[in-house]
Image: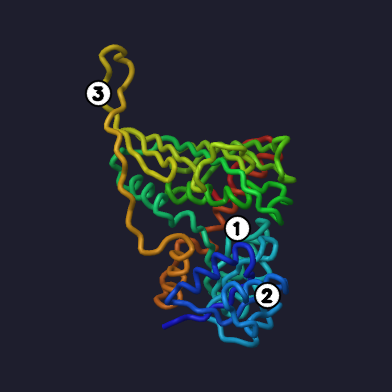
Amino acid sequence: MTKQVIQVGIGGMGNTWLRTVLGSPEFEHSAFVEISDGIAQRQVQTYGLDPSKIFKTLDEALAAVPADGVINVTPPQFHKEISIKALEAGIPVLSEKPLADTLESAKDIVRKADETGVLHMVTQNYRYSVPAQTLKSTIDSKALGEIGALTVGFFKGPRFGGFREEMDYPLIIDMSIHHLDMMRYFLDSDPVWVYGRSWNPAWSWYRGDASAAVVIGFANGVVVSYNGSWCSTGMETTWNGNWRVECEKGIISLEDDQVHTQLVGMRGSVYPFLTAATHTVIVPPVQMEHVAQAYLLHEFYQALTEGRRPATTCQDNIKSLSLVFDVIRSFESGEVIHCQSS
């Protein structure tokens, strides 16, 4: 049975969600909320939306149409207002990341979801790409034994304009939340301490720090090194970044969205104190019926129709967001931070 959703925010990232819902057999839009007349007019022309279904506020939309869910695609500073309004109305929420713009606002959302018992789910879509799922399945197979360390590199130079370029820490808050969440997901563990430094190169077009180096210790003993930039001038990684997983029996790597494994071979005869790495293998990509936003929308549908609890509820996702703010605390204090989620 098709479910009805109200999409709040139809410009920018809202385009992705418009296409995702319009392409889904499980959902259809009952209404849209958009404060910009220009964006609303443009999207009516682009997607053939019914202008009578576009409202200025979520209150107006909720009063006018039925809704089984709300998709919150507003900028982070509005996530709390929209999410709590929907939860108080008894309407499940599928919200863009980050959960909120501050940790206190995120905690308010979690408290409201707990209080009402209404589902709030965060769209950590990077977990659900073919490369990420291929890496996850390879790690989970334990074929290369236990993990000792993880190294992640991410380098991009996007020019979005708008709110991202005015944020204090655009890389960590708006982008690295994906990678930090993936660390928790891949390792099936939560962080216990973090140390990091951030900076902004002279050529950066961001107001805040767009580069960072971070070291994170996880409860299972794995140490993660993360280096990233959102104002890179070339030789970019994919959006997923490059991942190197150091295991007791070899290496698992994700580079340019392709997963490889390399087993440790026999000791060399010339330098017997070294081990020769052999048997590099390209791991076949996993097969997925749904990916990224489409995966999350399908998972949202299963939650609404079958009562399945999604992996990225606000109650779980606040641990990823807490790590973001622990990283920032380390930036600003210059100290090792004991994680709030541990």
Instruction: Verify CB contact (< 8 Å) between mark 2 and mark 1.
Output: no
Nearest to the eye among marks 3 and 2: give it: 2
CA distance separating discs 2 and 1:
27 Å
Q: Which mark is residue 98?
A: 1
Outermost top residue = 270
* Mark 3 or mark 2, earlier in chain: 2
Q: Nearer the viewer, residue 268 or 239?
A: 239
214 lies above or below 136: above
Give the residue pinned by disc 2. 41
Outermost bottom residue = 64
Give the residue pinned by disc 3. 266
Q: Nearer the viewer, residue 312 or 156?
A: 156
* Mark 2 or mark 1, earlier in chain: 2
Amino acid type assigned to the residue bearing label 2 in the image: Gln
50 lies above or below 322: below
Amino acid type assigned to the residue bearing label 3 in the image: Met
- Give the secondary structure at mark 3: strand
Residue 259 percent across, percent down from the top left: 37, 43
Nearest to the eye among marks 2 and 1: give it: 2
Which residue corresponds to the image point at 42% horizontal and 78% vertical from the top-left? 305
Q: Quadrant of residue 230?
A: top right
Amino acid type assigned to the residue bearing label 1 in the image: Pro
Residue 150 percent across, percent down from the top left: 45, 37
Q: Quadrant of residue 197?
A: top right
- Circle count: 3
Which residue corresponds to the image point at 60% horizontal and 62% vertical from the top-left? 13
| Mark 2 closeness class: few <14, some 14–19, many ≥20 residues within 10 Å | few
